Image (tube, helix red, strand yellow):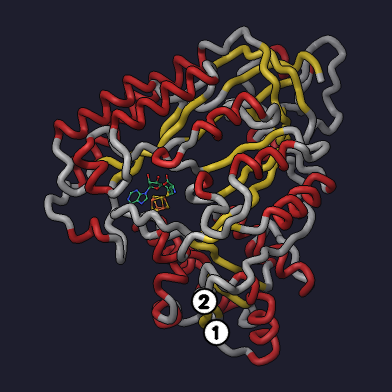
Amino acid sequence: MNVYDSEQIAKGLKPLGYKTTPLLERADLIIVNTCAIRAKAEQKAFSFLGRLAGLKRKKPDLIIGVGGCVAQQEGEKILKRVPFLDLVFGTHAVDRLPGMILRIESKRCRIVDVGMKKATDSMEPFIDSQIDGSATSFVTIMQGCDNYCTYCVVPYVRGRERSRDPESIIKEIRLLVESGVREVTLLGQNVNSYGKKEGLCSFTQLLSRVNEINDLKRIRFTTSHPKDLSDDLIDGFRNFEKLCNHIHLPVQSGANRVLKQMNRKYTREQYLEKIDKLRSFCSDIAITSDIIVGFPGETRAEFEETIDLIKTVVYDSLYAFKYSNRPNATAAELPGKITEPEKKERLQMLLALQENFTTQKNESLVGTVEFILVEGLSKKQTTGIQKTEFGLQRERHPAVQWTGRTSTNKIVNFIPGDDGMPCNDNLTGKMAKVRIEKAFPHSLGGQLRDL
Ligand code: SAH
Ligand code: SF4
């Protein structure tokens, strides 16, 4: 979501003559886009801001702004805490940002804008072609959230749930595709409730329209709340050929008492039923999840229930977090806070278990041929480190290792094949048939077979 918002900021500022630079020292304007989901993310934002003090001293005309959820949450207080800051703008102020920058440029004033929009105000994003040439892009289809999970800050910093007009979404995706995008990830805190409040089309109807867009090759979405995952959407995995074979279905906990305290509105049994249904409709679907360890009052036995659920589902991968108190979130008031060392131990135990499952799943793909949407040169390549796991191949093709994902969202780094496969063509945006040769804990290695 924040990646999309950062792109929105860049698109909005393009008409003012700003373009992105990889070198902070060269920037005339720095916007720090922040996340407030856990205390750690917030701390990171402030420590990054602290590091900008020296730059501002050297270059007094540099404009520095803070946007996103921390800006929304803290507002004017940030100006006091960071005295050299020019601008604080909230999650509903991105479309007003160009005007604010023009005012700062001409008047050198300090601005705070954390106003939230009314339900009748426009929420149209800046619709523009892809700015960085990548083959994949996020597209926000709805903002905010009405679910009020008790640990979560999102409803307070992003506001009530609102869905975008489907015509505008389709227009945005078409423009992205024209500029080379081949995969879109549709974003919302709970995509299953897309359009319900406003009486627009359903999420599955939206998917069906996106599926028709020429030259778009893949569709992903996140997040589907387990309480609202419909049979209709599950069926979509069979019906829409561009929809990738992966669902992120955050469970948060495997214990019913904790789920109730979290206000998740489903039980462990109902969650497991949805998993069974997904697998009966689509046997090889990849399933990933989010888990919070150490929610207030979570007993050791309840944590073990989460471990047991992980063993039952056997996820493809997991994002697990230590519970963090958030402003306004009602769980902060609950008794029975778990100590940091205990949370840390639970997290490590859970991650170690999952690492085994992820590795096993990755190993089972060795020897198969997978369709990869190529996203670009691999990280190793772009950072100039050319060491690969494939010694002999490296000698023959010293400079090329590409990266992309399987339909099941697994990262694959691959080298060109040895039978005349192109090595120096730009493969970004192409569908490549890659033979998987190695499995690692967080990625796969392979060799190009066909395009
Ligand atoms: N809308 C999505 C989640 C968005 S937030 C959903 O309902 O599934 C992404 C993840 O951050 C959550 O799934 C949760 O696991 C984690 N998270 C949110 N608030 C948290 C908190 N206070 N402490 C720790 N993790 C948190
Ligand atoms: Fe937060 Fe719950 Fe909304 Fe997800 S569904 S954003 S966890 S309140």
Quadrant of the image occupied by residue 157: bottom left
Q: Which mark is first along the chain, 1 or 2?
A: 2
Circle 2 residues within 10 Å: few <14, some 14–19, many ≥20: many
Q: Nearer the viewer, residue 312 or 132?
A: 312
- Left or right: 384 as drawn, with respect to 88: right
Assess disc 1: are there few (<14), some (14-19) or many (≥20) residues with their C-alpha within 10 Å of its C-alpha. Answer: some
In the rendered image, the residue lying farthest to the top is 367
Residue bearing mark 1? 111
Q: Which residue is pictured at 60% across the width and 31% down the height?
A: 236
Q: As rendered, which of 377 and 380 lies closer to the eye? A: 377
Q: Report whether the residue tagged 2 is closer than 8 Å to ligand 1.
A: no
**Cα–Cα gap, marks 2 and 1:** 6 Å
Rendered location of residue 365, percent (x, y): 56, 13
**What secondary structure is marked by label 1?**
strand
Visible in this render: residue 391?
A: no
Q: Residue at x 86, y 29 (%)?
A: 425
What amino acid type should be assigned to the residue bearing mark 1?
Ile
State the image coordinates of residue 15 (x, y, percent, origin top left).
79, 71
Q: Residue at x 69, y 38 (%)?
A: 208
**What amino acid is found at the position of numbered circle 2 in the picture?**
Val
Which type of secondary structure does the marked residue at label 2 adopt?
Answer: strand
Above-or-below relation of 184 to 401? below
Looking at the image, which is closer to me, 381 or 119?
Answer: 119
Q: Are marks 2 and 1 in contact (CB under 8 Å)?
A: yes
Which residue appears farthest toward the front when viewing the image? Answer: 199
Q: Which residue is mark 2?
A: 88
Residue 223 image position (x, y, % from top left): 50, 43
**Considering only vertical position in the picture, is 354 above or below 255?**
above
